[in-house]
């Protein structure tokens, strides 16, 4: 599962909020906070998630804003990795 969030000045997540978004308590998650710009190459990361999931069960949260934001959201939806964007 991948969730993309827009960063705001009031951004705050806790475990209960993650569970409410569809994350499982029993599966590890990784969070990335960064600019969603081309030089970060987040498209590559998102496209390789199926390979990672063959090896480990994990959840990924990507938090950020930038010129790639909408394109990455569309990619995540297209690949059906998400329950919430």
Image: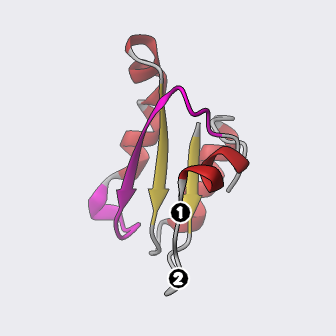
Does dot 2 land on a helix, a strand or a loop? loop
Name the residue rendered at 46%, 35% in the picture: 47
* Coloration of the structure image: secondary structure
Identify the image quadrant of the N terminus: top right
Magenta span contains residue 34: yes
Mark identifier at residue 8: 2
Question: Element at badge 1?
Answer: loop
Label 1 belongs to which residue? 13
- Which region of the structure is painted magenta? 23-40
Residue in the picture at 70% in, 41% down: 22
Neighbour tally class for label 2: few under 14, some 14-19, many 20 plus, Cα within 10 Å: few
Is 52 in front, or is 68? Answer: 52
Image coordinates for residue 15, horizontal then vertical, percent: 55, 50
Figure check: 72 above or below 83: below
Q: Quadrant of residue 66?
A: bottom left
Q: Residue furthest bottom?
A: 9
Residue 36: x %, y % from top left: 41, 66
């Amino acid at each position: 599962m991948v969730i993309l969030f827009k960063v705001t000045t009031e951004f705050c997540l806790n475990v209960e909020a993650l569970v409410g978004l569809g994350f499982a308590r029993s599966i590890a998650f990784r969070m990335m906070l960064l600019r969603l710009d081309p030089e970060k190459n987040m498209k590559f990361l998102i496209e390789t998630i199926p390979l990672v999931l063959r090896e480990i069960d994990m959840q990924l949260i990507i938090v950020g804003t930038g010129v790639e934001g909408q394109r990455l959201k569309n990619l995540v939806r297209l690949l059906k990795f998400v329950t919430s964007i």
